[in-house]
Amino acid sequence: MQQILFLKTHKTGSSTMANIFFRYGDSRNLSFVLGRDTLLGWPTKFHIIFPYRFFARQPNILCSHARFNKQPMNWLFPKATSKYLTILRNPVDNFESVFNFAHLGKLFGLGDRLDSLETFLEKEIPFNNSRNVMTYLARNPMMFDLGLSLEYFQNLSAVNEYIQFLDREFDLVMITDYFDESLVLMKRLLCWEIDDIVYVKLNERFDKEKARGLSESVQENIKRWNKADVLLFEHFNKTFWRKVKNEGPSFYEDLAVFRRRKDDIRRLCLTNKVRRQRAYHDKFVKGYSLRKDLQTSTKALCENLVRMENSFLEYLRNKRTEELRNAGLEKQTSIKKETGWDAAKDLRYEPVKTRN
């Protein structure tokens, strides 16, 4: 299968997933849906005008942040020839991660302390995106990424109907809390190999930036505030384990092999040293240190394994530009201003004269 739409959700391990798709597609010279940065029009719903032009080449993989929009996505990735995937995380951990990573407490005037989450949940907060686009993630962030409009967040019938719609649209909804199991399911769905899904966790916050030991009342309020995400997660958590069960005992054999291979690759590539690494602008996350004694044959693998999303995207954009240049298409990426029709004279207009 070489047409894959991965709907990237916020703070669900989706940056690690994107790295897997980048490595797979780059090694096979597949075509990616690319934009100017990590976002494909987000928070606006996806439209085909958001990515760079494709010319005559059919795109193979979309794995950047894009808000789900059925019609243009189905046009670009036909259901008959594509697989649609996304990933969800239990709403308590997801919302804590989104809230603190996006500094939503500060954006809502509550300060940037870890306890601002509790203060936020105790207030009646009206929606206001005038401060920053990240405030779109301040309620039901996974449902928002998956395309449900804000006006339906408190409409139970609309939420349930939308969940059923998503169930029909996506071939696999993975679960961050069972990341390895999710990848084995994906490998089987896409007919990949074990080495195609090895990974290290990317874009992970430092421990001091995580709100640890949330009280029962805060956890309950997170669930109540993000009720649509709770219903979404509960539905797809059930479908996930149903898919695992249908795979039979060989699934767990695959899982054991994968975990051994993942550990082998990690020992091959990395030291135990954690370093501070820039992710986006002023965002710093946990980074990795590569071993100094890497063989030439494995160095590229190890470097790509820890490569951050912005770096990979810049490389893929440059690669695409070079391909267009070699095909003589690079100049067509900009619109040329047209001159008048009298620039040349060969087909000059000479009217028939009916009067002397």
Image (cartoon, helix red, strand yellow):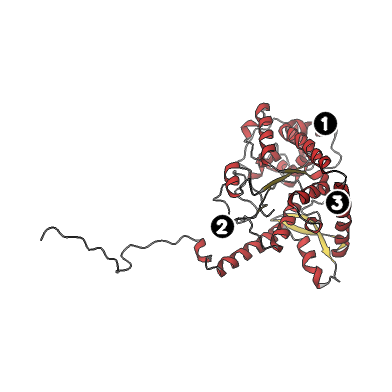
Q: Which amino acid lies under the numbered mark 3 shown in the image of this protein?
A: Asp
In this rendering, would 324 be left or right of 29?
left
Q: Residues within 10 Å of mark 2 (few under 14, many from 20)?
A: some
Residue indicated by mark 1 = 217
Q: Which residue is mark 3?
A: 254
Q: Secondary structure at mark 2?
A: loop
Which numbered disc, 2 or 3, marks the residue that appears first in the sequence? Answer: 2
**Residue 297: image x %, image y %?**
80, 71
Query: Quarter of the image containing the C terminus?
Result: bottom left
Which residue position is annotated with label 2?
Answer: 54
Of marks 3 and 1, the one in the foreground: 3
Q: CA distance from mark 2 to mark 3?
A: 37 Å
User: What amino acid is labelled 1 in the image?
Assistant: Ser
- Apparent side of residue 349 relative to residue 118 in the rendered image (left or right): left
Secondary element under disc 3, as helix, strand or loop, is helix
In which quarter of the view is residue 340 placed? Answer: bottom left
